[in-house]
Image: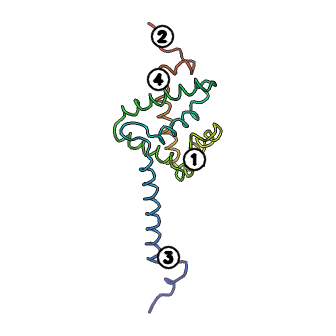
Amino acid sequence: MVDRAIDHPLTPKRRWFLKTALVIGAVGASLGGLAYWKRGISDGKLTESGRDVMRGLAIGIVGPMLPKDTTERNAILEGHLAHLEVFLDGLPNVLRIEISAILGLLGNLPTRKMLTGLGSSWGEASEDDIAAAIETMRMNPLPTTRLTYQVVRGVTCMAFFSNSDHWKLTGYPGPIEL
């Protein structure tokens, strides 16, 4: 005798679970492949995509402290990116790999759209779009997305404020002479 309650149409079958697992695995592998293909750090240097992401994040996080003059602003941002590479080079290898993966996720359109809602690249986005993307990460209900925000904000701020050339932009005169 067969229990017909088990054959209910809404009861998932084994094949359905296998198909679903294969689809989820394929999607995960493709997103992981994209993040690896367009990662943020390669050979100890920021990749083109990584530079684009970190430049956009710097504009969104420390932008109000940057000068309004475009030439000065670009020079400071380029200096920040150079200092950031030195900063990242001083981190343990495990942290560099994790930051590279995060920059890869934020550099690729599908994962950037999922994490931030930003449809264009960081370099093409307006300051308002970047601010909205950062706010989306900051206030996201998923803890992993909020953690991603905290990591990129922490790295950006540590690299920016540890550079004594940027102190005058913030109004900090530097250490007091004793």
The residue at 54%/50% (across/down) is: 109
Q: Residue 116 carries which label?
A: 1
Task: Give how far apart the Cα atoms at labels 3 and 1 are.
Answer: 34 Å
Task: Give how far apart the Cα atoms at labels 1 and 4 are.
Answer: 28 Å
Give SS at disc 4: loop
Give SS at disc 1: helix
Residue that mark 3 sits on: 12
Q: Which amino acid does label 4 sit on?
A: Asn
Q: Residues within 10 Å of mark 3 (few under 14, many from 20)?
A: few
> Residue 139: x and y, percent?
59, 44
Residue that mark 4 sits on: 163
Q: Does residue 1 appear left or right of residue 62 in this picture?
A: left
> Residue 52: x and y, percent?
52, 39
Give the residue furthest to the bottom. 1
Q: Which amino acid does label 1 sit on?
A: Thr
- Mark 4 and mark 3 in contact (Cβ < 8 Å)? no
Q: Which amino acid does label 2 sit on?
A: Ile
Q: How crowded is mark 4: few (under 14 residues within 10 Å), some or many (20 or more)?
A: some
Q: Residue 176 carries which label?
A: 2
The residue at 44%/77% (across/down) is: 15
Quadrant, the C terminus? top left
